[in-house]
Image (cartoon, rainbow, N blue to C red):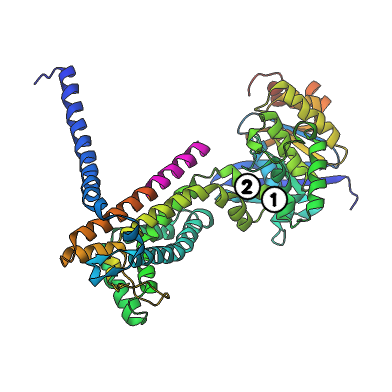
Amino acid sequence: MYVNPRLEQRVVQSILWLFTAITVFILFYIIFFILKNGLPVLNYQFLTTNPTDMGKSGGIYSTIIGTIALTIGAILIATPLGVGTAIYLTEYTLESKITRVIRFGSECLAGIPSIIFGLFGFILFVTKLKFGWSILSGSLTLAFMILPTIIRTSEEALKSVPYNLREVSFSLGGTKWQTVTKVVLPSALPGIVTGVILSVGRSISETAAVIFTAGSALRIPTSIFSSSRTMAVHFYILAREGISMPNAYGTAAVLIIAILIINITAYRLMHKFMKKYS
Amino acid sequence: MTSNIAIESRDFSHFFGPLQTLKKINLQVFRNEILGIIGPAGSGKSTFLRSLNRLNDLVPGSRVEGTLKIDGKDIYAPDMSVVELRRKLGIVFATPVPLPRSIYENVAFGPKMAGVHSRRKLNELVADCLKQTTLWEEVKDRLDSSALKLSGGQQQRLCVARILALRPDYILLDEPCSGLDPISTMKIEESLRELKKQYTIILVTNNTKQAARVADRTAFFLSGEMIEIGQTEKIFTAPVDQRTNDYIVGRFG
């Protein structure tokens, strides 16, 4: 069957354009929908007072603190582990069976549903190790969840550091460790930071893994052994139990704005990084 | 230890996996001379240079046979400190590779890694090394600006200054002028003649005229073998081997 090439080009282009438009439309519609329902309850007081009456009234202050505490904990645990693994994989071993196994393992870790992480964290940290529902249990669980992202992005960042910089460092009498810490890591830092920031976004929005491990207590955590409720969990409970839809949307709006800010920052950093090394 | 022989290579061979890149090299380098090594691409001259400070060790599958002695010590002996060795033989690469740091930090990098932290000592060292490469007047007011902003010729002189800061005994140059304009090349060659008084220099170059201009003695490498070594003048006017002659007059290479 003969199709006029110009017509074919037109049709294909229109279909592809439509697909793109649908994707963008869905994204913007979600953001618009959340903001439309959430913004009316958003004000200074909503952000700075604690929830009262199970969240029916009052603000979301304690859940913001809970989210921040869990995220910081997860990042503090996952960053050294992830960056360390990436350094080992890129600088200290050659491509071999072992590195492939490590990489495959970390990629599988990325594919595990978060609810499984939640159950695993519940069994190991909450009950077996007796950390209880706590910031500690939640942070550890989240850390395992974001580990693959940090390993992958750090590895890419380390690999993009030109080989001859390493050679120069060695030729100037640098040891392996000095080369890694003084030459390779500083050059890879923007890329690593980008990966960490993306993981922050992931930790903030995580619900399933957190509800089983950090609990859902509506109070400001006082130590790493206090249980706490994050914004995402708060939204889930408010909406599911039908406690207060306006407050649920308010929480969602704060969450979405936070993630937008984080992603835009990460994107900017990445852009700056690429410009510097290309 | 006042022997005039600084480097001695005896039946030295090098392999990358199954590929033999150097075939039983026998040669000597004398103290305070400039030895030029010429030869076409792939002749093994850079591999030989990188064997001297064991930079080839970094490449997986690299293996050596025979002996390579520097100051009377076998540098491939198990008790050899590679870090010390590399401080003793500073190398300058074909393309200047400044570290993404300031001019000052580039020169101070080697000494700092060797444990020199006194600000006063470092300041003196940096100034001294930059003066020796005639870069001082050009950069003395902007030592803290990025080394990446320097021109190609300046960057290469910075790389020379950077290895001088190691206080080495040897300077290895791997086609140091291949990416430079004639004036920058002239400046580098001038500083080489000056540096010869204090250092033993090995200059790998695929610019035969450069070897003729600055080297005291010249060696000709071809396909991993050393074909001929002798006084530069003799190599260029009356070479013993026909292949040397063919290369010099430009019949191949």
Relative horizontal placement of residue A134, taking residue B103 as reference (left or right):
left
Q: Position of residue A264 (x, y in %)?
A: 39, 45
Q: Nearer the viewer, residue A156 or B225?
A: A156
Q: Position of residue A125 (x, y in %)?
A: 35, 76
Answer with the quarter of the image where residue B102 lies.
Answer: top right
Label located before the other in sequence (2 or 1): 2
Q: CA distance from mark 2 to mark 1?
A: 15 Å
Above or below, A240 relative to B154: below
Q: Badge 1: few (under 14), some or many (20 or more) residues near its Cα, within 10 Å?
A: some
Outermost residue on the left side: it is A1
Above or below, A60 relative to A23: below
Can residue B217 be seen here? no
Q: Residue at x 42, y 47 (%)?
A: A266
Numbered label tally: 2
The secondary structure making up most of the magenta span is: helix
Q: Amino acid at mark 2?
A: Asn
Q: Position of residue A207 (x, y in %)?
A: 27, 63
Residue located beneath label 1 in the image: B66
Residue located beneath label 2 in the image: B56
Q: Residue at x 74, y 40 (%)?
A: B172
Relative horizontal placement of residue B194, taking residue B15 as reference (left or right):
right
Q: Residue at x 67, y 53 (%)?
A: A174
Q: Nearer the viewer, residue A69 or B238?
A: A69
Q: Amino acid at mark 1?
A: Gly
Magenta range is: A263-278
